[in-house]
């Protein structure tokens, strides 16, 4: 029997002595332990939760339409046999199609995704996203099925009358609290079925388990939310039921009961009955659990959320060091960026550089491929990064390296910065780098990806530090630019020119006073100072940059990185000048309301 990753279950056991199987593989246990069942559930849930919205929706749509078969057979047999029990015998048919066919069903999803979330391998928003898509697909499929049944071409008149009677019973004869508690027990049965289904070894056993489990729902006069929605939709089309009444007095109480029954009474109980070592197997050995913040508000989940390979844990941290983090995609071509970080670190007390090689991995990378290629990836990365470590020697700076393999190249930069808590991140930016394809239009990213530290983004066009132009209008980002300029002045003897732009000749004197005071406050008294009274910041920078080898500018308005990923760079200066450009940004403390409803301007 194959698990969701395609490996045979016996192969997993032969590889893992901790499973209680002799390493020779001669004996296979008759039953899975609770830990092994839990591992299989988590592996399957990780595949589901990280699936695309379209894939999930249409799988759920097929599942919702399959529920029509359950309703069809249940109501069609009653007029012929005058027995609810006989009709109930074919009630599980639609669910058999769904479970064995691998379609998505909302109540079935109360167990696997919740198990993944309890393990902090998936975030809470990812769980709700998954539930929402599956529920929407199930309801859409059930509504389509109800519409087909309502035509009168499928059900005989007597069967149609009975179907409407069944729906009216749920809406009018059963109270909301009764619906809720009946839904709780139905949810318990379905989630329990999922657990037992993952413990089954053959299709015949699974078929029998699914049949008996869902047979208890009509025999126990219980309610399943997707069936209830389909019945209510049929009554809305053929009867006089209103949508609001159908939802508040039927569908919602049943849905809440199903959810709570599955989550609380089965998932949590089954979760805590497994041991603390429930995920100590080869397939989970490289998984990092989400931090509490990632778990609570993170936007992604599963192995697409955490790195597939991360060698950071092999690094011994020095809490007294001033650390600069340098994420690089290609160690062969980004040595200049590491050299810049080393120059900055050499001007700091106990300064050191951590270069992390971020390797882009396809989202569809299988667990087998990951396991087989892990050591090869690490070995090749270490070979490439060996030259990077030597860059710090001329600066007398230690360069430590690590490797990340992940589908989330851009997000990993922020994740690593939050974990390491460096003083500064120095990263390159060009059209051919991995993170240039990132986008900032996702609202959740704007809410959660506050900069964890100072950022310096480099547009590398030769990295000549001899003459640096530093435009400033004041503010924390300009102060960061000044810190960088001072370090380069002290380390590589760079010449610094300060530029301040005012709106006209009448402001020149005030501009000169501002620039003189700003230079003194930021330790750049010896820098050349230029005040431009044209009022056009972009043109002024481009004119002065003609005689410079590098431009160092700070972020304004909505922030540097959000403009980078939305392809709206600072005044288009980066594209207009021919020199290297360093863009500096410091963290801000915008509130959530400002991020949601503000104009995007950053407080300086």
Image (spheres, helix red, strand yellow):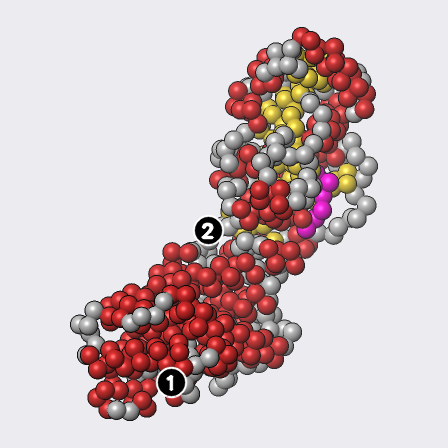
Numbered range of the magenta stretch? 419-424
Tell me the element at label 1: helix
Name which residue lies at 69% across and 42% down: 589
Left or right of residue 274, residue 178 in this image: left
Name which residue lies at 33% across and 80% down: 166
Q: Looking at this rendering, what residue extends furthest in the left direction?
A: 153
Circle 2 crowding by C-alpha within 10 Å: few under 14, some 14–19, many from 20 = few
Q: Which mark is residue 372?
A: none
Q: Quadrant of the C terminus?
A: top right
Q: Badge 2 is on which residue?
A: 362
Name which residue lies at 54% across and 68% down: 114
Tell me the element at label 2: loop
Q: Point out the frontmost of discs 2 and 1.
A: 1
Quadrant for residue 544, please give it. Answer: top right
Q: Badge 1 is on which residue?
A: 218
Q: Which x, y percent locates residue 541?
A: 61, 17
Circle 1 crowding by C-alpha within 10 Å: few under 14, some 14–19, many from 20 = some
Q: Which x, y percent locates residue 118?
A: 59, 68
């Amino acid at each position: 029997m194959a698990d969701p990753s395609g490996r045979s279950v016996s192969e997993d056991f032969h590889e893992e002595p901790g499973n209680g199987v002799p390493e020779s593989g001669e004996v296979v246990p008759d039953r899975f332990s609770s830990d092994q069942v839990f591992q299989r559930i988590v592996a399957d849930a990780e595949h589901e939760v990280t699936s695309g919205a379209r894939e999930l929706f249409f799988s759920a749509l097929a599942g919702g339409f399959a529920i029509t078969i359950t309703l069809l057979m249940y109501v069609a047999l009653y007029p012929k046999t005058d027995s609810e029990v006989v009709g109930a015998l074919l009630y599980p048919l639609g669910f058999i199609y769904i479970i064995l066919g691998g379609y998505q069903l909302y109540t079935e999803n109360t167990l696997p995704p919740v198990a993944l979330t309890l393990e902090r391998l998936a975030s809470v928003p990812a769980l709700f996203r998954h539930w929402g898509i599956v529920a929407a697909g199930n309801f859409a499929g059930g509504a389509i099925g109800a519409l087909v049944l309502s035509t009168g071409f499928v059900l005989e008149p007597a069967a149609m009358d009975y179907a409407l009677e069944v729906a009216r019973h749920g809406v009018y004869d059963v109270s909301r609290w009764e619906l809720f508690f009946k839904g709780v027990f139905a949810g318990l049965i379905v989630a329990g079925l999922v657990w037992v289904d993952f413990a089954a070894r053959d299709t015949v056993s699974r078929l029998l388990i699914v049949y008996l489990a869902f047979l208890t729902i009509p025999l126990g006069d219980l309610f399943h939310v997707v069936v209830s929605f389909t019945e209510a939709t049929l009554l809305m089309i053929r009867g006089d039921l209103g949508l609001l009444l159908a939802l508040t007095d039927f569908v919602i109480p049943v849905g809440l009961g199903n959810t709570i029954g599955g989550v609380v009474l089965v998932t949590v109980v089954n979760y805590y009955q497994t041991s603390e070592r429930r995920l100590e197997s080869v397939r989970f050995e490289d998984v990092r659990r989400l931090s509490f913040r990632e778990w609570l508000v993170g936007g992604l989940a599963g192995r697409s959320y955490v790195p597939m390979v991360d060698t950071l844990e092999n690094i011994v941290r020095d809490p007294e060091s001033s650390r600069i983090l340098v994420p690089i995609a290609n160690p062969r071509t980004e040595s200049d960026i590491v050299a810049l970080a080393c120059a900055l670190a050499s001007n700091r007390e106990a300064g050191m550089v951590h270069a992390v090689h971020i390797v882009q991995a396809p989202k569809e990378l299988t667990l087998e491929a990951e396991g087989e290629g892990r050591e090869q990836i690490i070995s090749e990365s270490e070979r490439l990064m060996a030259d990077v470590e030597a860059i710090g020697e001329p600066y007398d700076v230690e360069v430590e390296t690590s490797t990340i393999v992940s589908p989330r190249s851009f997000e990993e930069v922020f994740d690593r910065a939050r974990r390491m808590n460096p003083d500064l991140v120095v990263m390159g930016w060009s059209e051919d780098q991995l993170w240039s394809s990132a986008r900032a239009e996702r609202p959740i990213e704007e809410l959660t990806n506050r900069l964890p530290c100072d950022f310096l983004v480099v547009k590398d066009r030769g990295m000549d530090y001899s003459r640096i132009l530093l435009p400033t209008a004041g503010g924390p980002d300009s102060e960061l630019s000044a810190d960088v300029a001072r370090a380069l002045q002290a380390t590589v003897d760079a010449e610094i020119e300060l530029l301040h732009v005012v709106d006209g000749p009448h402001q020149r004197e005030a501009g000169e006073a501002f620039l003189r005071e700003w230079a003194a406050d930021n330790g750049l008294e010896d820098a050349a100072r230029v005040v431009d009274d044209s009022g056009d910041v972009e043109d002024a920078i481009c004119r002065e940059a003609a005689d410079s080898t590098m431009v160092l500018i700070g972020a304004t308005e909505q922030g540097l990185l959000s403009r980078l990923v939305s392809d709206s760079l600072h005044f288009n200066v980066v594209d207009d000048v021919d020199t290297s450009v360093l863009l500096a940004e410091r963290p801000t403390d915008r509130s959530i309301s400002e991020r949601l409803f503000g104009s995007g301007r950053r407080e300086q």
